[in-house]
Every structure is written in structure tokens, then in C-alpha cells.
Image (cartoon, rainbow, N blue to C red):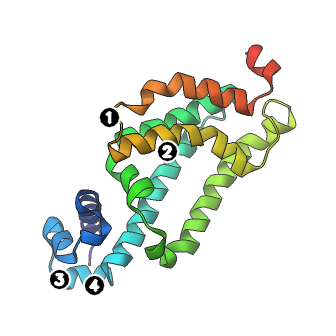
Amino acid sequence: MTASVRDDLLAAGLFVFDRVGFEAATVAAIRARARTSNGSFFHVFGSKKELAGVLFLEVLRHYHAAILAALDPVPDAGQGIDRLIRAHLDWVVTSRREARYLFEISRSEWGDDVRDAQRAQNARLAEGIEHWRAPLVARGELLPMTPVMFVSQLIGPAQIFCRAFLSGRDRADPRAETDTLIACASRALRPPDRINNQ
């Protein structure tokens, strides 16, 4: 079985899940979209739930790669906050179907099988952010706080706009709020004297 069949099934799964949701999606609909046989589907994935879990990890990996790319080359505190927020917003808008799957469609009850792999991916993202953040905290350029608090202050407000956009509650492009979100995150994450001196 070629990797392309797997990729075709993942792409088809993403399309079908986005269109009708996980519960209403069927293996038959995914197979039809991917133009694969029943045997091909079950050769690659044991169930719709397994495909959904693998797809979740793939989308999560793409999202994390986009976020970590914002830290290369290594930015200063202000640039990093700016780039990370922009990277999050850009990925959500330009990868809307994937973002909807990651933030709106995925469900914890069928994610148990991929929980360890998800934790490992999340740990790599946290390590990448911390590698950039820790020296800046030590130099007094970022306020000291736990890594979880840092990410919540950095991405949390942007995520509110993104969720409204992804759910269709708000059709406005969340990137329209980029400058304000960056300014708010800077006030939350940087000492006041460091913001004013930039």
C-alpha cells in the first residue's frame, strides 16, 4: 500500500469531517472521496476513529511547524511575540479546514489512542518555545511565568477570534485584529519599561 493512498484517505477524511462532522461521517463517504476500495481503507486504517486520530496528529504537526518556524531566526522578545501571534492567525486563516478540525471538530473521546503521541508533539512545541523564551526571561525582557501561562497570554486572546471565525459566528478575518492582539500580548508578557524602550 503506497503512502499516497494513506494521504488520499487523510485528505478525504479531513474534507468529510469538515463537511458533516465526525459523527455523521462514514467510511463509505471517505472512501468515495478518496476513490479507494473498502479493502484499501481497512488495510491502512482499522476504523474511522483511527483515521481521525492519525489525522489529528498530522494536522497538529503542521500547526506546530508553522508556529516554530516563526522563531527562526531567533527573534528578540518583541519580534517573537509579534511573529508567534501572526503565525497562529495566518495558519488558522490559510489552513481553515485543518484549523477547524484541530480546534472545533476533534474530540477527546476518540483521541485516547493518540494521546501519547499528542503529548510528545506538544512537548516538542513547548520545548521550542521555551528554548526561545527562557533566555529572554533570564535577561528581564519577558516577565517570569509558567510556560502554560505564557502561551495562554500569547495565543489565548487570538484564539477567541479564531474560534468565532472557524465556527462561522464571525465572518471577519481574525488577522484584522493582529496589531491590537500583539499590543495586548506585549503588555501581558513584557515589563513595561521594555515595551516603551523598543
Q: Mark 3 belongs to which amino acid?
A: Asn
Tag 2 secondary structure: helix
Query: Which element carries disc 3, helix, strand or loop?
Result: helix
Q: How many marks?
A: 4
Give residue 69's position: percent from left, percent from top: 54, 42
Q: Is residue 17 visible?
A: yes
Q: Which callout, 4 or 3, points to the residue nearer the camera?
A: 3
> What SS does tag 4 mark?
helix
Q: Which residue is mark 1?
A: 171
* Category of crowding for the residue at label 4, using alpha-carbon neighbours closer than 10 angstroms: few (below 14), some (14–19), many (at least 20): few
Disc 4 target residue: 43
Label 1, label 3: how many angstroms apart (C-alpha)?
38 Å
**Residue 115 versus residue 167 in the image, above or below:** below
**Amino acid type, mark 1:** Arg
In the rendered view of the protein, which quadrant contains the N terminus? Answer: bottom left
Say if mark 2 contacts mark 3, CB within 8 Å. Answer: no
Q: Nearer the viewer, mark 1 or mark 2?
A: 1
**Residue depicted at 49% across the width and 44% down the height:** 66
* Residue bearing mark 2: 66
Give the alpha-carbon distance from disc 1 to disc 4, as whole Å: 40 Å
Foreground of the two, 94 or 167: 167
**Do residues under tags 1 and 2 come within 8 Å of each other at their CB atoms?**
no
What x and y, as percent, mark residue 58? 42, 62
Do the residues under discs 4 and 3 have CB atoms within 8 angstroms? no
Residue that mark 3 sits on = 38
Q: Amino acid at mark 2?
A: Ala
Task: Point out the tag, 1 or 2, that comes first from the N-terminus.
Answer: 2
Residue in the image at 17% along x and 82% along y: 38
Give percent across and percent down for residue 44.
30, 80
Looking at the image, is 99 positioned above or below residue 55? above
Q: Earlier in the sequence, mark 2 or mark 3?
A: 3
